[in-house]
Image: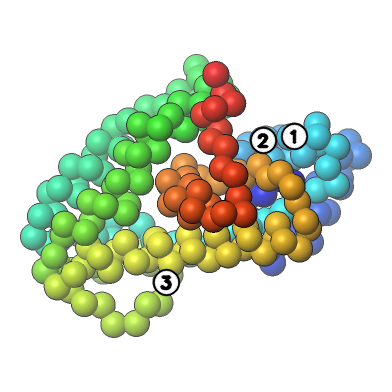
Amino acid sequence: MVMIEREPKEQQLMDSLYMAFDKGELKLADLEGGSSETFQVGFRLAKKMGLKGVHGIDHYESTSQSLLKSGTNFDLFKNGLMKLISTARPLKKKVQQDSLSIYEYIKTMNRPELVSLSHNLIFNLPAYVIDGKFSEDGTNTVDIGSIDERYIGAEYITLFYNRNLKIYSNILNVQLQNRAKRIVLIMGQLHIGVLSDLLGDNPNYNLVKVSDYLK
């Protein structure tokens, strides 16, 4: 089974697109967003494996990294963000300029040190930030009720963790419904650390990291 970063409510659309792709009636280059890993990796891999389709397990909620803008110890978070940006953006630019293959990009971004870097930024460093505020210009579509600004960094982590818990729930239920024995999960790199922790602690799953395959 191949799971992709699309919501279950989009499954009918994904089924239709995949069927057309599998029959040779759809070129990914002609599809809006066709250059994304959802299609370039997910669709191609599913077809190569002879699967009937792919499965959406995302729960889309948008929270920008710029939402956390102030507070005591904010520089710890800001410096971590700058380190991630200075590491990841040049790699993405190389892919866009065709000087780095998608394979090498995925391989690099899944290195343990880079997964740890992004995971630390989202789920660790913000906890240092207290007595601050969220930016009025920052993006956030998650409603978690009132915000305790004393623990503004912890509130920030909650936004990301909330979404990933729902993604995790989708993974478990889609697998259960389809009785899949093996799963390839294709998600954005920022999700990998937390989902690896959740799945790694689930006794029903044997987690194999992509870095073990991409040599």
- Viewed as shown, does residue 91 lie left or right of 177? left
Q: Give the alpha-carbon distance from disc 3 to disc 2, as whole Å.
A: 29 Å
The residue sitting at the front extreme is 203
Quarter in which the C terminus is drawn: top right
Instruction: Look at the picture and state if 53 lies above or below 154.
Output: above
N-terminal of the two: label 3 or label 2? 2
Mark 1, Cα crowd under 10 Å, few <14 / some 14-19 / many 20+, is: some
Toward the viewer: 127 or 175? 175
Instruction: Look at the picture and state if 132 lies above or below 38.
Output: below
Report which residue position mark 2 lands on: 41
Dots 2 and 1: beta carbons under 8 Å?
Answer: yes
N-terminal of the two: label 1 or label 3? 1
Q: Identify the residue shown where x is 53% and y is 36%.
A: 209
Report which residue position mark 1 lands on: 44
Mark 2, Cα crowd under 10 Å, few <14 / some 14-19 / many 20+, is: some
Q: Identify the residue shown where x is 37% and y is 77%.
A: 144
Q: Identify the residue shown where x is 49% and y is 64%.
A: 165
Measuring from the top left, give residue 77's x and y in whole percent.
20, 50
